[in-house]
Image (tube, rainbow, N blue to C red):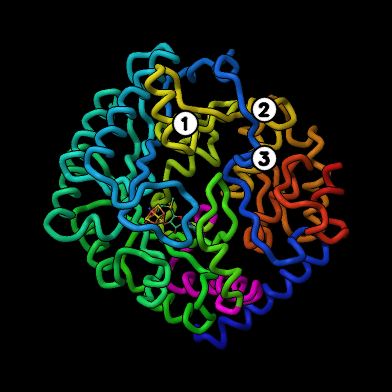
Amino acid sequence: MNLKELLISANKRVDDFHEMQRLGAHTNTGEFIPAGVHYPPITKYPEIKYEEMFKGYTVPEDGLMDVYVHIPYCSKRCIFCHYPSIYNGSDSEKDKYLDAIEKEIDIYLRTLNIDKIKLRVALIGGGTPTDLSPKQLERFLKILTKKCDLSNVRQFNYDVSPSSIIGAEGIERLKILKTFGVDRLTIGVQSMDDNILSHMNRNHTKKEALEAISNSMKMGFQTNIEFIYGYPGQTVESWYEELKQIVKIDVHELQFYRLKVDAYGDQQGTIKKHIFLHPDECPIAEDTMRMKQMVFDYLREFGYEENLRRVFTKKKSYISLYAFNQCCMLYDQIAFGLTGFSSLRDRFVLNTQHFDEYYKRISEGRLPFNRGYVRDKEAQQRWALILPLKNYFIRKNHYKKVTGFNISETKLYPIINKLKEYDLIEEDEKTIRLTSKGAFFSDEVVGLFYDTRFIPKERKYFNEGPLNPYSLNE
Ligand SMILES: C[S@@+](CC[C@H](N)C(=O)[O-])C[C@H]1O[C@@H](n2cnc3c(N)ncnc32)[C@H](O)[C@@H]1O
Ligand code: SF4
């Protein structure tokens, strides 16, 4: 499809966007509120007492768990990023963090009363977990693999930056990852336009990103690359030029994030201030919608489908199992490190975002979480609906297994029925899923199932239409 053809379909989505605003489902300002990766949203978690967090919790019957480890180091600060990280950190600082991670895993093992974690899927993220020297990377992987039983592991994912896996040192890192069984890499490419990469303050060029991708593919890693759209300076035309280059890259998975301007944790990235100072640089909401629809239409021509929300692959099996397990299977996941979050059946535990507090808690022999939420029956019903609906689809049997209720018995079912009237949700005997329009507005649609206490924006941000999230949930 050429740009003119793509815009015909994209403009229809803009009409849908205006309709969603009129109905009250989309913010009237056009602001984007990401939803459906956690519920309730992490910014809404209260402080929680240490003893309360594990009261009544037992490890799953088969003992299998997914593990996330957060390594909060980066070489440079990207202006869109909201994660707390240390930039250009010293080796001794990183060694101190690895010492703490080792202790944290031991404390967790003691708390759960197990000798080793029976690992199903692992994800090491950040920050940039390869912003460690090869020696430190090896040390970290030795720690992790010693504390986990890897005999059942299905996927071992690592987030990497392009610059950390190129050149002699980069190849050395990749060899270390291979040795320890890492089989899947996510590379933050972000843009195929060097001007935008430099505006983002990325530490790599497009050429270096392509070299990193080629290294990853040549060494046999399943490779996922990530992009951001709706970024200052991007236009519909420039995005089309980027897409033409993106489809030529030979990888397993392409992931597209709409720019998030507001923080979703405690730290606000500089992007908000930048946009405030340079409002004209930012694409208008309508153009961002066009860019999003162009991804669907253009990629389909090259055999890519959205197989998990915002994730495009040629084969279903290429998706991240970590994301699938978290959002669709609702499996238990344990997280280690700063900002990590553990999802344990009916509760969610959030680690501190502050280094001082993290080190203090570990030195006291305590886990470093400071906030969390144990979901009651209703919150559990909402969580088990929101995550799978947003990211994949709801399997009614699975819903009943997780919550103990048939979905049609819950107070959420009338909302599902209402959304069918607006061509946003469809249902068959076994499943409930988003229509293609619903999938395009997946964040907004699942936002309609939030308890009013947890809707991130006040009522004034939504028109008083039939799909106003406050009136639907009162
Ligand atoms: C947790 S981040 C870490 C990525 C990795 N450190 C890197 O820079 O390559 C994972 C992905 O989220 C996306 N992302 C991060 N901040 C974002 C923002 N403010 N808006 C949209 N996407 C964002 C980026 O595509 C990024 O690759
Ligand atoms: S986007 Fe990645 S590399 Fe950039 S500051 Fe955030 S975590 Fe670090």
Q: In this picture, which residue range is highlighted in magenta?
A: 280-309
* Residue 425's disc number: none
- Amino acid identity at mark 2: Arg
Kindly tell me whether residue 464 is visible in this rendering. yes
> For the residue with label 3, is its CB less than 8 Å from the closest atom of ligand 1?
no
Question: Which residue occupies 55% across, 18% down?
Answer: 50
Write down the quadrant of residue 367 in the picture.
top left
Q: Where is residue 39 in the image (x, y as percent from the top left)?
A: 64, 39
Q: Mark 3 points at which residue?
A: 385
Q: Where is residue 320 in the image (x, y as percent from the top left)?
A: 42, 47
Q: In the depicted view, which residue is nearer to us: 335 or 261?
A: 261
Image quarter (top left, top right, bottom left or bottom right) of the C terminus: top right
Q: Name the residue under label 1.
A: 333
Label 1 – label 2 distance at C-alpha: 16 Å
Q: In this view, does 110 lie above or below 248?
A: above
Q: Is residue 95 above or below residue 306?
A: above
What secondary structure is found at the residue carrying circle 2? Answer: loop
- On screen, residue 378 versus residue 244, left or right, reads right
Q: Position of residue 179 (x, y in %)?
A: 17, 40
Label 3 – label 1 distance at C-alpha: 18 Å
